[in-house]
Amino acid sequence: MNTMMTIGWDDFVKLSSSQKASVLKADAGQGMFHILLAQQFGRKELDDLGDLATKIRFIAKTDKGAAFLGSLLPQKRVMLYFSQPSTRTFLSFLAASQILGMRIGEVRDASVSSEFKGESREDSVRTFSSYYDCIVMRTEIGGLAERMAWVLSNTDRPVPIINAGSGKDQHPTQALLDIYTLQRSFEKAGGIDGKTVVFVGDLARGRTVRSLSYLLTNYKKVKQVFIAPKQLQIGSDVVEMLKSKKVNFELGSKFSDVIREVDAVYMTRIQDEWDQKKGESACIDISSFNFKTEYLHKMKKSAVIMHPFPRRAEIPTEVDGDERAVYWRQMRNGMWIRTALIASIFGKNKAILDYELKSRK
Ligand code: NCD
């Protein structure tokens, strides 16, 4: 029995993220359906998705392979519903859907949809589900993707919702591409286990950090360090989660002190769109939280510099040429991991693995 259909919204919303993840997992049976929270992914799912993404990018290199991938989902339509600005997430989902041969619809500006006439988001999303087979949504409202998933699960057309960034809370598919980037970066260096990951910047309002911090708890002996000005330090819910999982972590405010020990630096921008009072963030001195070119000399040779982008002054462009700067690769990884995710949601992972196996013979 589908739990989302038997549990009322008021009860569902009160569950912890891990409990919600269990409900989503049980409802998806052997596969994947709604993708809402980082908590839905354990080590096995992360390994499988990364492996699938790498096989997809290998297959896509030849015309024949690209044609095979494009023949997988031509009968499926995806709606990209982005009511918040986006470049990379939007385009990589678009490209991922194209790779799989899907047809694509988009709404990026609520002012040109019936929301402008006062339609509720719920009615909008139900409308999309009438025409599309999957809804990728980005919204400024925390928890809205969950609500929509619950709403759709209680209709006769429950199509999967993929959370492409919801409010300040979660951005699970960004965390997937971040993990994929770390997997690839440390492929020949023992993998992600045992590494030190340092998050820098606006950690209070950065949803990518929240999701990635959770995903990293799937790895052994990973140390997480959070470097931020006091007002922008990581939230107590993440701290409690790390404590309950007995993760080695530290909170600090001196970036230069940790640069020698990092294996991965995860830079973030100030999320001033969330300011409660206009100009509030501008009063915070963030200059010491920017990556300085001199850090390149202090960092380990094997370390990587990441950023979900968009960037402002956190990383000077001079750093781009250093081989440890992986943020451009990180972006491209996003396209492949999202292709792997959509293929898995629609049960095409086995066909891809079989094709790859055959093409190696
Ligand atoms: C991030 C986001 O939207 O949360 N961007 C992204 O998806 N790559 C980070 C940000 O906007 O700073």
Image: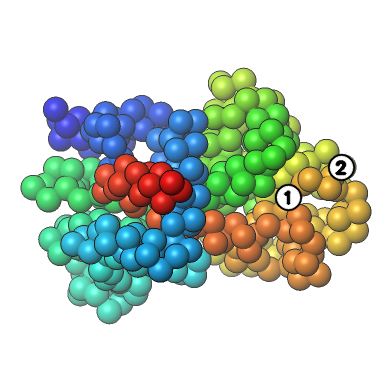
Counting from the top left corner in percent of width and height, residue 197 is at: 70, 40
Counting from the top left corner in percent of width and height, residue 283 is at: 72, 62
The residue at the point 41 percent across, 29 percent down is 18
Dot in front, 1 or 2: 1
Counting from the top left corner in percent of width and height, residue 160 is at: 25, 49
Residue type at tag 1: Val
Out of 117 and 109, give the one closest to the viewer. 109
Q: Can residue 246 be seen in this view?
A: yes
In the visual, does 356 lie left or right of 23? right
The residue at the point 28 percent across, 69 percent down is 104
> Image quadrant for the N terminus?
top left
Q: Earlier in the sequence, mark 1 or mark 2?
A: 2
Q: Disc 2 on helix, strand or loop?
A: loop
Q: Mark 1 points at which residue?
A: 304
Question: What mark, if any, has residue 340 been given in the picture?
Answer: none
In the visual, does 1 lie left or right of 81? left
Counting from the top left corner in percent of width and height, residue 174 is at: 50, 52
The residue at the point 23 percent across, 64 percent down is 74
Q: Mark 2 points at which residue?
A: 260
Q: Disc 1 on helix, strand or loop?
A: strand
